[in-house]
Amino acid sequence: MHVLLLIQWNKLTSEGRVVVQTGGVYTVPAATSSDAGRYECAASNSYATPTRSTEVQVTGTCLVYTITIAKWFTGSAMGSSG
């Protein structure tokens, strides 16, 4: 059986969740200090909506920062910068 999966990235702020991307990979080109913060990934289907979050820190110059889903069911997310 094929189950449709919707992946949504949110930035968690004091005002609540702000949708920043729909899809499995969230990329921040030319990341600045305003991009720092807690991000959450929600994977929704007709059965459940599990979420995982990660903290992003921006120090110095970062040309690209990418957050991908890795080992989703173990709860870890991977980030890379370039």
Image (tube, helix red, strand yellow):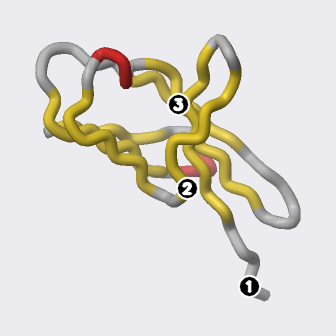
Tell me the kind of residue under disc 3.
Tyr
Q: Secondary structure at mark 1?
A: loop
Residue 41 lies left or right of residue 36; in this view the side is right
Residue reaching furthest to the right = 47
Q: Which numbered mark, 2 or 1, is in the foreground of this view? A: 2
Residue 41 lies left or right of residue 63; in this view the side is right
Residue 78 location, quadrant: top left
Tell me the kind of residue under disc 1.
His
- Per the image, the residue denoted by label 3 is 39
Above or below: residue 55 compared with residue 70: above
Above or below: residue 40 compared with residue 27: above
x, y percent for residue 35: 37, 24
Mark 3 surroundings: few (<14), some (14-19) or many (≥20) residues within 10 A: many
Tell me the kind of residue under disc 2.
Thr
User: Quick one: quadrant of the N terminus?
Assistant: bottom right
Q: Secondary structure at mark 2?
A: strand
- Per the image, the residue denoted by label 2 is 22
Mark 2 surroundings: few (<14), some (14-19) or many (≥20) residues within 10 A: some
| Lower sequence index among marks 1 and 3 | 1
Q: Compute the Cα span from label 2 to label 3.
A: 13 Å
Residue 32 lies left or right of residue 43; in this view the side is left
User: Which residue corresponds to the image point at 66% horizontal and 47% vertical from the top-left?
Assistant: 42
Residue 18 lies left or right of residue 81; in this view the side is right
Q: Compute the Cα span from label 2 to label 1.
A: 20 Å
Q: Secondary structure at mark 3?
A: strand
- Per the image, the residue denoted by label 1 is 2
| Lower sequence index among marks 2 and 1 | 1
Mark 1 surroundings: few (<14), some (14-19) or many (≥20) residues within 10 A: few
